[in-house]
Image (cartoon, rainbow, N blue to C red):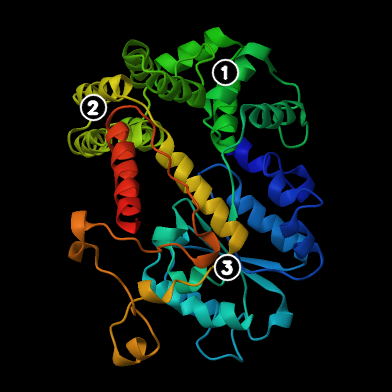
Amino acid sequence: MPRPLAARMRPRSLDEVVGQEHLTAPDAPFRRALERGAFPAALLWGPPGTGKTTLARLCARAAGLRFAPLSAVQSGLKDLRKLVPPEPGDGLFASPREGVLLFVDEIHRWSKTQQDALLHHVEEGTVGFLGATTENPAFHVIPALRSRLWLLQLHPLAVESIETILRRALADEERGLGGRVRVTDEALGIIAGLAGGDARRALGILERAAAASDGVVDPVLLRRLAETGDLHHAPGGDAHYDTLSALIKSIRGSDPDAAVYWLARLLEAGEDPMIVARRLVIAASEDIGNADPRALGVAVDALRATREIGMPEARIVLAQATTWLAAAPKSNAAYRAVDAALAEVRRTGALPVPLHLRNAPTGLARALGHGRDYRYPHDHPDAIVEQRYLPDELEGARYYRPTDRGAERTIRERLRWWADRLRERDR
């Protein structure tokens, strides 16, 4: 059997990688470090089909290292210790000069104990190490290991990048389809949209469509493939991200009719309802926030209910949540607040916690001044007291600015009333 088109078309050099230029461009910090021989232990984080395994292989090649892959799905501590023995001096990594790169795919599937086994070797540099995960490392990679790795995030590929990869496969006579099939521009755009940012999926769709064609792949053929369940989205340009974007923007624009229409389009096309439900949870905080604090609860309940009951009944749950969110008052104040605070942290670094706010569980901590002069708000009228809660350098900074819409009007008035009360006490 011939190798799948996606396997044949894997990039052979960093210059062939499409869509991850923040890592692979000649001036990208990671690539510069790689080519200068300062190989950094790193973690590749991104959704399926964005090139994590391919990039790991290319990193080994660019750094002149031998590639030693492990799958966390199929391998455990026993397999790891064959490569990385507990005591240095034998095994594959007897010396870093042997020039081997250990690559652990799906590392989030390893337990804490299994991940712990890597710590010493990564810290001492006896292992050239790359891990890959599709899950958020903050939740699935232990902090001790995560702190020793350079986190490299890979993004879903843009439609334009997918189209570039498809055209390359169509033209490549050695590894690709070599001009044996013609794909119309409209069909190419449909395939790129259907891929949902996943190059492997796009090449799989192209390969199946080419095999089913009489030499031409057009929207009519793609529609017929969709009817057999081969494609998850109906053709006609309704790309995965475009349709999800239309749903979220209709909710943000307070149009429940449009929002439920785009929801129906997604479900009818075979979209995973959990993807839709997760997007509703994000919209509840990003676009509604404290203007209607109930919105997040509605969305989370919809997520849980969708997981428990599945389709087709989950369509009703999702419709209820979608119309509620679309009809709710809107505010992005929480979204703007956290981004402003993150920008402050990145600008000013880890400013010290004021002494009066520090935890004081021990006598030593109290002797060092932790918790001293802290004023307990409940001991004061209205449970508010004039007290500094930000670091000295940030006194007076404001990040959260509630709007005058929905429940945020009450929040804004409460904050203003508190400020007025404190000023009255100072007089």
- Residue picked out by circle 2: 311
Residue 405 horizontal/vertical position (percent)? 34, 27
- Residue picked out by circle 1: 190
Q: CA distance from mark 2 to mark 3?
A: 40 Å
Residue 258 in the figure: left or right of residue 55: left
**Which badge, 1 or 3, comes first in the chain's sequence?**
3
Q: Are marks 1 and 3 in contact (CB under 8 Å)?
A: no
Q: Residue at x 24, y 22 (%)?
A: 315
Q: Mark 2 vs mark 3: give the one in front.
A: 3
Q: Residues within 10 Å of mark 2 (few under 14, many from 20)?
A: some
Q: Residues within 10 Å of mark 3 (few under 14, many from 20)?
A: some
Residue 149 marker: 3
Q: Secondary structure at mark 1?
A: helix
**Which badge, 1 or 2, comes first in the chain's sequence?**
1
Q: Amino acid at mark 1?
A: Ile
Q: Residue at x 55, y 77 (%)?
A: 83
Q: Residue furthest top?
A: 220
Quadrant of residue 327 in the image?
top left
Q: Amino acid at mark 3?
A: Leu
